[in-house]
Image: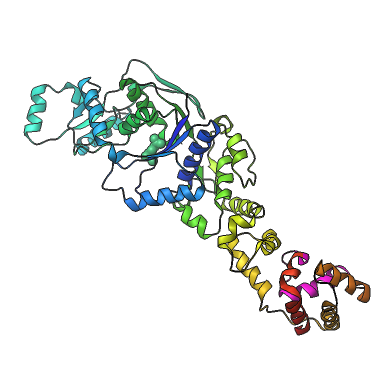
Amino acid sequence: MTVTTRFAPSPTGSLHVGNLRTALHNWLFARRHGGRFLLRIDDTDQARSEERHVDAIRADLAWLGLAPDDEERQSARFDRYEARFAELVAAGRVYPAYETAEELDLKRKVLLGRGLPPVYGRAALTLTDADRARLEADGVQPHWRFRLDHDAAIEWDDLVRGHQRFDPRTMSDPVVRRADGSWLYLLPSVIDDVDMGISHVVRGEDHVSNTASQLQMFEALGASPPAFAHEALLTGSEGKLSKRLGSLGVAHFREIGIEPQALIALLARLGTSDPVEPFADPAPLIQSFDFGRFGRAPARFDETELAQLNARILHQLDFVSVATRLPTGMDAAAWDAIRPNLSTVAESADWWTVVQGPVDSPAPAEEDRAFLARAAALASEIDWSADPWHALTDALRAETERKGRALFLPLRQALTGRDHGPDMAALLPLIGKDRAIARLSAA
Ligand code: GLU
C-alpha cells in the first residue's frame, strides 16, 4: 500500500497554528513512509472561499518547507460529486428532506425538553411520491440526507484515540447537500478520499463524529475506508482553548522572527511522548514520527517555548541559509560571531551596527581611563592577523595585573557600547584595528 495523506483546508481564512500542525503531521507521516502528501483545497463553499486564501495557504506551506506532491481542488470536481451523489440517491442511501430550519429546530427542542437525544426523526422517509410532488409544486426544494445504516455499530481503530465505537441510532442522518444544490463537506471529502487513494486521514479530533458517518459513506460508495488519526487539539499556554491560537499563523510567526524550522520542531513533537528538541533539519523528526506516540490530552502550545527553540535552532543555522536576510556587508565570519547571541535573525542588524559603528559607549569610570588609554596604545602594537583579543588582553593583564571582569568589562564597553554580547575574540577582528583604536581612545 502506498501511503497517501492529504491536508484539506477550506480557503475561507488564513491557516492558524492548529492547521499548520495538521499539515505538518500529514507531511511527516507521508515522508516517513515514502508516500505522497496532497494539498486539497476544500472550496465547495464558493461564497466563502477566496483565491487570496488559496494563495496564502500555498505560501504558508512553502515557507514551512512542506511541498505537496500534488494539489487538488474540490471546485474542479463538482461533476464527479454529482455523479456519485446520483448513485447514492438511486440506491436509496441519500434521500430528499423538506423540513425548514425552524421546523427542525422546534423538533430538536421538543426532544430535548423530553430528555431525549435530538436525533433527526426521519420524517422525510415517510413521505409518499405524491407528498413530494406536492411540496415541490409549492416550490419547496429539498435538502439531502445520507441514510445511516442502523444495523450495526460503527467502529474503527483510530491511530491516536484507539478503538472507537458509535451507535448509529444515536446519530442524525447527516445533511450532505443543501436545498440550493451546494455541498456540505462530508460527502465530497469521502468521494475525494476514494478517488485520490487516500490511505490515512489525519485531522483534528473535532472530526471524530464526522468520521463515524463518513465510514458508512465509504462503504456505500463501495470503497474500503482509509485509516484515521484524530489528534487532540492544541490549547494555549493558559491551558484552555484560546481564541488567540486561532489568530496565530505564519504571518505572525514571521513577523516576530520565528524560523520555519523552529515551528516544525515544536509542532512535530507537541502532544507526543517524545521530547521537543532543536532540530534544524527535519530528518530526525520524520524518522521518529509515529501516531502511537501521541497522547489524547490536549497539547499545550507555548509561545515562550517556541521562542527558546527558535534561538537554539538559529544558533545552528549556517550563513548560506540566512544570508539574504542579513544586513549588507555582513559575511560568514560575522554571522558565526554574532549568531550565538541572537534570538532572531533580525537582531543581527543591531550587532552589525556594533561592528561597523558608530557605537555609543558610556563614559568610562574614572579608574578605567588610564587602563583604556593603555589599551588603545597596545592595540596599535599587537598582531591583528591572528587573535587580537587574546593578544590585547594578555598584554594588558601582564601590565596592569587586572583580571576577570575588571579586565574585560571596560574593554567590552568601550569597544561595543554594551555590557554583554558575542564573544569578543570573534567580534574584535570584525571591528578591526582602526575602529578599535578609535573607540578605545575616545573612551
Ligand atoms: N476542510 C475540512 C476542514 O478544514 C477538512 C477536514 C478533513 O481533513 O477531512 O475541516
Give the x, y percent position of residue 147. 27, 23
Residue situated in front as seen by the camera: 243 or 184 = 184
The residue depicted at 78 percent of the width and 81 percent of the height is 364
Magenta span has 372?
no
**Taking the image as four quarters, which one is ligand 1 found in?**
top left
The residue depicted at 32 percent of the width and 25 percent of the height is 217
| 267 lies left or right of 61 | right
The C terminus appears in which quarter of the rendering? bottom right
Q: Residue furthest front?
A: 385
Q: Could you say which quadrant of the image residue 193 lies in?
A: top left
Magenta span has 415?
yes
| 418 lies left or right of 343 | right
Figure check: 45 above or below 141: below
Count all numbered tags in the image, as a single digit. 0
Residue situated in front as seen by the camera: 355 or 175 = 355
Q: Could you say which quadrant of the image residue 206 lies in?
A: top left
- Read off the magenta span: 403-425
Residue situated in front as seen by the camera: 13 or 237 = 13
The residue depicted at 63 percent of the width and 51 percent of the height is 313
Which color mode does the image show? rainbow
The residue depicted at 49 percent of the width and 57 percent of the height is 252
Residue situated in front as seen by the camera: 111 or 443 = 443
Give the x, y percent position of residue 164. 46, 24
Figure check: 303 above or below 349: above
Which SS type dominates the magenta stretch?
Answer: helix
Give the x, y percent position of residue 29. 52, 34
Q: Could you say which quadrant of the image residue 132 lies in?
A: top left
| 204 lies left or right of 179 | right
Give the x, y percent position of residue 157. 48, 23
Figure check: 201 above or below 268: above
